[in-house]
Amino acid sequence: MVTCPLPVIGVVRTGRTSAETTPVQAALNRSERGTVEIFEQYAEGLGGLDGFDYAWLLTWLDRPDAPSDEAPALTQVPFLLRGQGRRMGIFATRGPRRVNPIGLSLVELHRVTGSSIEFAGVDLLDGTPVIDLKPYVTRFDSPGREPRCGWFDSVSLVDGVTPADLGRAGSAAEAAES
Amino acid sequence: MVTCPLPVIGVVRTGRTSAETTPVQAALNRSERGTVEIFEQYAEGLGGLDGFDYAWLLTWLDRPDAPSDEAPALTQVPFLLRGQGRRMGIFATRGPRRVNPIGLSLVELHRVTGSSIEFAGVDLLDGTPVIDLKPYVTRFDSPGREPRCGWFDSVSLVDGVTPADLGRAGSAAEAAES
């Protein structure tokens, strides 16, 4: 079980158990389904969520590559730059090895019933702890224009791509990044 | 000073000191400028961020209305529904009184230099602790279609709107929500 310093509100259920073979982003794996099981004591907080098509899943990604008491390197080679071996500052990546390993996944909501949420868009391992859930609101969550997206603009973002597809990590410090 | 159970990577500097008169979302206040001061020991993590036009600012909103040891109500009246007095489950709102008071603000990056980030889009109080910073990536962060946005679709989202503009909170349990 993962150690999370925050109250956990639920758990993600997916068919994924290995980070290396899990797609790097929900949006690159829109068809795969998963479930969020919200703990019973928080289920009342889901009221109204069924009116939304998308939500932000905030998770605690305290797996799989490093002991959580080891500070992550401030520059790392993202998954998507493994081929080039290029390093980036962690705050210019979406990778899991961060000062606070918070995952931000945009998922499509399919069914919200009781304490369970069926969603599409899987980039999370089975058992990942959920720390927050927020509705996607177009007006709040989309830029007013087509933005520059840094180094992501120069890499190919292939549906379903996993770290394993992108070559081996060069070293522990260059571990799993999206 | 705010108590945050996670390592804090920096602090937000804005001209705002009262939640009631601070716009409820960055996207509804796109012209106002602020700064993120990343602590020196994390500055190297900003490398590459200057290539992005937008970023997600993840903050710890442990202010202002409730002692942090009091569990937030699971249904609350959001700021934007104060007029109607309608309650929503907290996971269907973007309000600050959550199990984990994590703020998610989409800000426009203007200048990234050393350990400082000038941005536009202010919905945060001066001094708010920053717990993570992620680049906005259109392919990851936008739904594949125009989504339903639940109760937000039936309220007017006026630029610059603040809680104070929306009427008084009915009770402590109905406190500040966006």
Image (tube, coloured by chain):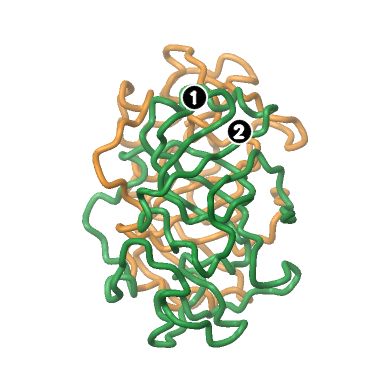
Chain colours: A orange, B green
Residue B12 sits above or below residue A70 on the image: below
Q: Do labels 2 and 1 share a chain?
A: yes
Report whether A175 appears left or right of A51: right
Q: How crowded is mark 2: few (under 14 residues within 10 Å), some or many (20 or more)?
A: many
Q: Which residue is drawn at 75% across and 30% down?
A: A70
- Give the image location of residue B78, x and y in percent: 46, 76
Residue B165 sits above or below residue B107 on the image: below
Report whether B106 appears left or right of B61: left
Q: Residue at x 68, y 28 (%)?
A: B40
Residue at disc 2, secondary structure = loop
Give the amino acid type for the residue marked by disc 1 in the picture: Pro
Comes first in the chain, label 2 or label 1: 1
Reading the image, the residue beneath label 2 is: A97
Residue A32 sits above or below residue B77 on the image: above
Q: Mark 2 lies on which chain?
A: A
- Give the image location of residue A129, x and y in percent: 61, 54
- Give the image location of residue B105, x and y in percent: 46, 51
Q: Which residue is drawn at 67% across and 33% down?
A: B39
- Give the image location of residue A79, x and y in percent: 47, 25
Q: Gap between marks 2 and 1, in whole Å?
A: 10 Å
Q: Residue at x 65, y 31 (%)?
A: A65
Give the amino acid type for the residue marked by disc 2 in the picture: Arg
Q: Mark 1 lies on which chain?
A: A
Residue A104 sits above or below residue A75 on the image: below
Question: In the image as oriented, which residue stretches furthest toward the left?
Answer: B146
Residue sitting nearer the eye, A61 or A99:
A99
Reading the image, the residue beneath label 1 is: A78
Question: In the image as oriented, which residue stretches furthest toward the front?
Answer: B15
Question: In the image as oriented, which residue stretches furthest toward the top?
Answer: A84
User: Which mark, residue A44?
Assistant: none
Residue sitting nearer the eye, B136 or A42:
B136
Residue at disc 1, secondary structure = loop
